[in-house]
Image (cartoon, rainbow, N blue to C red):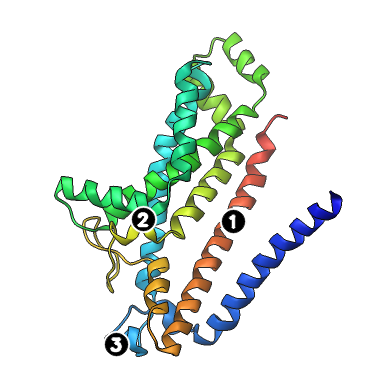
Amino acid sequence: MLGLMIASVILVIGVLLLILVTVMVKGLPALSLQMLIQVPKGGYYLGKEGGILNAIAGSLALASGATLLSFVFGMAVALYLQLFAGNSRVVHLVQLSLDVLWGVPSIVYGAFGFTLLLLLGLRASLLGGIIALALLELPIMVRAMEEVMCMVPFQLKEASYALGATRLETALRVLVRQAAPGLLTAMLLAFGRGIGDAASVLFTAGYTDRMPTSLLRPVASLPLAVFFQLGTPLPEVQQRAYAAALVLIVIVLITSIVTRLLTRRLSRHVIR
């Protein structure tokens, strides 16, 4: 069994390294400063000049907006399940629903978001992409938050109640403060899922060569930039697709590093 566990670890690390090496080998030759600071120009997808600045800005806007929106609703749901719902059937029903939603393919969220946009009389836009990604991230956010809040010592809650604090005050001043490092991790998981998803924004966010300027206009994203460029028969354009994928990986890596630094700083106030 120990050998199987070691083999599993080696397999996971090996797959990660294989992905990183493949993307770096194929993407680094096409990566340049101009590619990062310019928007696509005429004929960019035919190998001519331009860059992916619009896709970088669009991905950050989509993922940040969706993560913030899912955090607001997810925090409310997690606090309700932990402090207000008790051990009722509602808790088990909500948890089951979240588990089912977690397993729903992202293309289903995209189709649902597209249908919702049609009902509201809207077209593919930044707002539509944010809503679709928020629905995609919400189950991850709530389940991760709930697990983190379960780890907060129950004695702290009892002490807060004994001092006369209400449930809401206990939730905001004790539970959230003690679970802050884990809540950041939950946001990172949701952000990583959102910024790397293509299927849910394909029909809801659309695609454009312009920078995002309005919630009601289409917006580009890095996953779709990779998808469209890999679909061309031109080798130089396919190299740009791997370069865009490398930029996406670097964004997730930077986000992870910053989150870990903030988590360590917030962990000083956590009572074990």
Q: Residue at x 60, y 40 (%)?
A: 182
Q: Which mark is residue 200?
A: 2
Q: Can you say which quadrant of the picture contains the C terminus?
A: top right
x and y percentages locating residue 63 in the rendered image: 41, 55
Q: Residue 166: percent from the left, percent from the top?
A: 49, 14
Q: Are marks 1 and 3 in contact (CB under 8 Å)?
A: no
The kind of residue tagged 2 is Ser
Q: Earlier in the sequence, mark 1 or mark 3?
A: 3
Name the kind of residue labelled 1 in the image: Ser
Q: Is residue 20 left or right of residue 32?
A: right
- Residue 135's place in the image compared with 27, above or below, is above
Question: Label 2: how many residues lie within 10 Å, few (<14), some (14-19) or many (20+)?
Answer: many
Q: Upstream in the sequence, badge 2 or badge 1?
A: 2
* Pointer 3 local density, CA inside 10 Å: few below 14, some 14–19, many at least 20: few
Q: Identify residue type, mark 3.
A: Gly
Q: Secondary structure at mark 1?
A: helix
142 sits to left or right of 229 = right
User: Which residue is at 29% across, 64% downward?
Assistant: 219
Mark 1, residue position: 256
Say the numbered circle drawn on residue 43. Answer: 3
Q: Which residue is at a point 49% across and 26% down the rendered structure image?
A: 79
Location of residue 92 in the rendering, given as x and y in whole percent from the top left corner: 50, 24
